[in-house]
Image: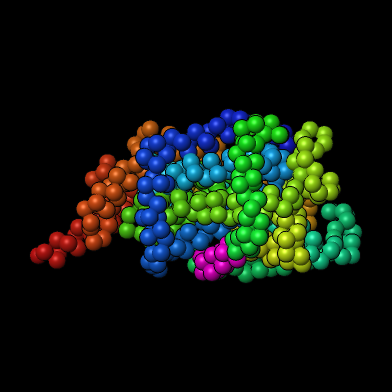
Amino acid sequence: MQAFVDFMNGIIWSPALIYLCLGAGLFYSIMTRFVQVRMFREMWRLLLSNKSSEKGISSFQALAVSLSGRVGTGNIAGVAAAIGFGGPGAVFWMWVVAFLGAATAYAESTLAQIYKEEHEGQYRGGPAFYFEKAMGQKWFAWIFAIATIAACGLFLPGVQSNSIGNAVEAVVGSGSVIETSLFGALSFAKVATGTVVVLVLGFIIFGGVKRIANFTQIVVPFMALAYIIIASVIVLLNVDMLPGIFGMILEDAFTPMAGFGAAIGWGVKRGVYSNEAGQGTGPHAAAAAEVDHPAQQGLVQAFSVYIDTLFVCTATALMILITGAYNVHGGEGFLIQNIGANIAANGPMFTQMAIENVLPGVGAPFVAFALFFFSFTTILAYYYIAETNVAYIQRSLPIPGLTMLLKVAIMASTFYGAIKTADLAWGLGDVGVGLMAWLNIVGILIIFFASKPAIKALKDYEAQRKAGVARYSFNPEKLGIKNADFWAKKAKATETQKEKEIA
């Protein structure tokens, strides 16, 4: 199984995908005139909007749901893996992916808002919806929907729960060994952890998107802030080392010890896995938001990429590099070995050891605590994304019990990931991320050349902003955007209301 997964990743994560991720980000940055820089203050203003409705969640809640997907084990174990296999220079390429990816995140999330639908009393949308409506290619939309259900419902949850299980085991020990005929020898700590996570997961996902949004809007900001505070303490206690650390990151980015390709490859791979820009996951939460103009949620989602990579991932990287709690793998041995050879890079141990070096007795339990909430909320986001694509498929092919089957599958995947090895879990996760990234990035580039809806929406929003309108509005038909049925209906209702008021 491991050999097959590695083979698949070798194909999916070829240099072509790495160049596609960076190229798409650069392309949309140029086409939006670097919206991620120009509109930074507007992103912050929109972030604080708390408008919601019976059908939609607020911009902040949508940010929290999407951040719960972005801020996960990739920020802790993923950064460690990037450094462990790509060297310190991989951190630089994570920054590059975040900066360029913010423009990609704007485009995909704005598209999700433009082509969203009202489904069973709530807003639904995402790549499958905009592929069908903007590209006119329903078959492509179906491929993405099926790939996303497989990735978010089966492959990716195991990565998150695996890190939770490893972190808890590092704190309490493995405990007694449980012998099973199906899974072999298992540690009691991992079995117990997997059971608790699955039970809590079941309680929340059976409560719908509102319960997911209400949970994540409290937990995600609190845990992200707590994590950044701990990292800031470690950095401040070693502030004299910062110039050398940044110098090492920049030097290794272009003349890296693990090879130029390794630094870029691992930086981009873990960068995309962490901030998810271009992957097509963020648009699902973006579509659920209640906003006056599609571009508003696109800007909020662009800011979420900054939070994920430039804040949380950088915090992890600085802690690891300042304390020297890492190894760099190269070929059959190590290019750098600062810690034990038995400590896996594909796990939370680098980060736990980094905090433990500076704050004894705090590292292992704090990272386990942070990983539980980061990873758990990411699993919730994965469920919502998979459920949205199930809903898309059921529009054309109603299959009784499909949503219930998804809930059972994601709970099983979560438990399996908690008790199995890290390499297999991460390998499956990379397959899922890569498939979605290929389909989504190719799709949004085709949509751009076909009709440029995200760019038209941005220009319209900027024009209204310059005019100082009291309330933003969006009329897709006036902009030449077709099949945006929700917004066209809303614009018509608004015009009818104005005519009545005038009369």
User: Number of marks in the image?
Assistant: 0
Image point (38%, 59%), residue name: 46
Residue 401 or residue 105, whichever sits in front = 105
Query: Seen in the image, is 322 located left or right of residue 496?
Result: right
State the image quarter where residue 7 is shown.
Answer: top right
State the quadrant of the C terminus. Answer: bottom left
Image point (52%, 55%), residue name: 307
Q: Residue furthest front?
A: 240
Residue 213 or residue 325, whichever sits in front = 325
State the image quarter where residue 72 is shown.
Answer: bottom right
Q: Is residue 313 visible?
A: no
Magenta span includes 225: yes
Rendering coords of residue 354 (x, y %): 72, 56
Residue 424 or residue 329, whichever sits in front = 329
Magenta span includes 153: no
Q: Provide the residue span drawn in magenta.
A: 212-226
Rendering coords of residue 428 (x, y %): 69, 44
Rendering coords of residue 269 (x, y %): 62, 40
Query: Seen in the image, is 340 located left or right of residue 212?
Result: right
The secondary structure making up most of the magenta span is helix
Colour mode? rainbow
Q: Residue furthest left?
A: 503
Rendering coords of residue 485 (x, y %): 33, 50
Image point (50%, 51%), residue name: 306
Residue 229 or residue 434, whichever sits in front = 229
